[in-house]
Image (cartoon, rainbow, N blue to C red):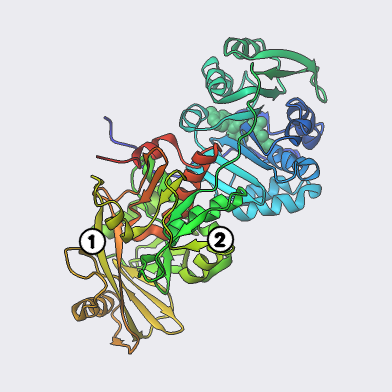
Amino acid sequence: MPAPKPLTQCDPPALDWSRPGTPAATNFGDIYFSFDGGLAETEAVFLKACGLPEGWQDRQRFVIGELGFGSGLNFLGAWRMWEATKAKNGRLHFLSVEKFPFDAAQLKQALSAWPELETYSAALIAQWPGRVKGFHRLHFGDVTLTLIHDDISKALDELEARVDAWFLDGFSPAKNPDMWSGEIMKKLAGLSAPGARLGTFTVAGSVRQALIEAGFDVEKKEGFGRKRHRLEARFPGERAPEEGIEPPTIIGAGIAGASLARSFKRRGVTPTIVHDPNHKAASHNAAALIKPRLDLQDRPESRFFLGSYLYALQAYCDHVVMEGVTHIPKTEAETERFKKLNIHAPLPIAHFDFDERENRLALGKSLVIEPKTILNNWLSDLSLTTDKPADDSLKILAAGFGLKALLKDRDIPLRFSRGQLTWAEAKISIPTTYGGYAIPLNEGVLLGATHQRLGDEDPFALKAEDDVENLEGFEKFTGQQAMPSSKISRASVRVTTADTLPLIDKIDENVWLFTGLGSRGFVFAPLLAEAIVSHICGDPLPISKKVWARFALRL
Ligand code: SAM
């Protein structure tokens, strides 16, 4: 297998702003939306063509798939129509693929032409992931947006979804043939729900032919603006009635369980949580860090690391204790790695900026959060019980160290690693990492965390030598003194796997396993939980098929 390429951001669009309000792409020689009124075009060529809003009025969930996100105008137009016409308790899912994403400033500039959409565009810009490659999931109340930043053909291969309405909005087929090929139309057919509708502005013979060959029934309709015709198409079949979801039982009330609860609640499903109130959970430390894990190469999991980090920043945005973390490289090799990452730039500079002269990495958007507040918030209004769940209910095992006992009769290759935190007094104002970490909090500086493969000992018994290790690590890398504080240390257990990747899989008819989050539980859990819950509820997945396969049980 060839070595993967370096992980970089997506290529930028080549924008020409010389016609106010209508950006054009110089590399395609085409405009993003009609000169005759982009928003009116959205309504006529895409929404109306797909039978909307009537099509979603009797539906609890409706999925739109778009080819070419561009400035997001179609998304915002669909969202606005949804707000005015949605079904009670309904949810809209909008998926869109884009190979040349705008950055936040370009998006702002393009959308400033639509003052009537201002509240919608401001919300989109606030969560915008920039030109980061891969899958991104954004939530706006009952509207969910999944963006796939990739070439259309690869993106469709990686997508798991059942789409009710397609908006085909590439540049014109003559200028942008990759978006309209027979191969693409076959992939759309494979992702279509029975009875799916499709709308597009073009009536090019090759597009019509490709749609017909892929199994769509195609009809020419009167066009919008200066275009004489447009196309509507329909995929055969009748959509099956929607099924409700049986409320599941989640075993574990740490960040994995709480993230599952959050994703279920968003869909109107109320889970029961089984937990042991006396357990010293890894998720109950005084603080946690949300920082990106960065790969030099573009492997499926590398994109997941970026996507889960960006998703976590959004998930915790109401619970931030501090923003901005400094990282001190531990070794020469790490310095070299950061230099390369600065050049490849998989994330925008606001998130990752290595200063070679100072030998310091600025993680400007990384967060310190307080686990207790987040868990309380996400688990609020749920029944927490110590009772065993009924045998036939859907269960998700998300119990961290508790899994050791729960899975003792099964051959599941988990590793358990003990970690101890130490409270210190030290002069430091910015959260700093160096292999270990130092987080300045009101109660003192929290130093963490040691790593020991767990043997038969009591994992929660405190060790004096671990406190020494934490204090010495801090002094060695920061060059600052640290005094032990009177506040008592804390030990807990991480669950990891041999390849340090998480584990999500169905292990029995009614039983899911969600574990192996290691020391990155707070970063990985929200998006992985969203993936499991999306799968259970039949919603589009927020991670690629390749990532899903990588995280399945590895025996
Ligand atoms: N729907 C957009 C809006 O509301 O602003 C306008 C889309 S514009 C007409 C076409 C889009 O397709 C551009 O954003 C372009 O970058 C994207 N595109 C072109 N070739 C692509 C490819 N091979 N894969 C994915 N996206 C592509």
Instruction: Name the residue tied to disc 2.
Output: 382
Q: Is residue 458 left or right of residue 550?
A: left
Furthest toward the left, the residue is 456
Badge 2 marks a residue whose secondary structure is loop
Badge 1 marks a residue whose secondary structure is helix
Q: Position of residue 72 (x, y in %)?
A: 67, 41
Instruction: Name the residue tied to disc 1.
Output: 332
User: Residue drawn at (67%, 48%), measured in percent from left and top?
Assistant: 142
In the rendered image, the vertical position of residue 450 relative to residue 69, given as above or below: below
Q: Is residue 18 left or right of residue 481?
A: right
Of the pair 536 and 520, the residue shown nearer to us: 536
Question: For the residues marked 2 and 1, what is the alpha-carbon distance in whole angstroms?
Answer: 49 Å
Q: Amino acid at mark 1?
A: Glu
Of the pair 377 and 480, the residue shown nearer to us: 377
In the rendered image, the vertical position of residue 367 relative to residue 295, given as above or below: below
Q: Position of residue 301 (x, y in %)?
A: 37, 44
Residue 96 falls in image quadrant: top right
User: Residue drawn at (71%, 15%), measured in percent from left and top?
Assistant: 203
Q: Position of residue 107 (x, y in %)?
A: 65, 47
Q: Is residue 352 left or right of residue 297?
A: right
Please tell me how crowded label 1 is: few (under 14), some (14-19), or many (20+) other residues with Cα within 10 Å.
few
Of the pair 14 and 376, the residue shown nearer to us: 376
Q: Position of residue 468 (x, y in %)?
A: 21, 80
In the rendered image, the vertical position of residue 221 relative to residue 30, given as above or below: above
Comes first in the chain, label 2 or label 1: 1
Q: Quadrant of the N terminus?
A: top left
Residue 230 falls in image quadrant: top right
Q: Amino acid at mark 2?
A: Leu
User: Residue drawn at (64%, 52%), measured in percent from left and top?
Assistant: 125
| Residue 26 shows up from this direction | no
Quarter of the rendered structure image containing ligand 1: top right
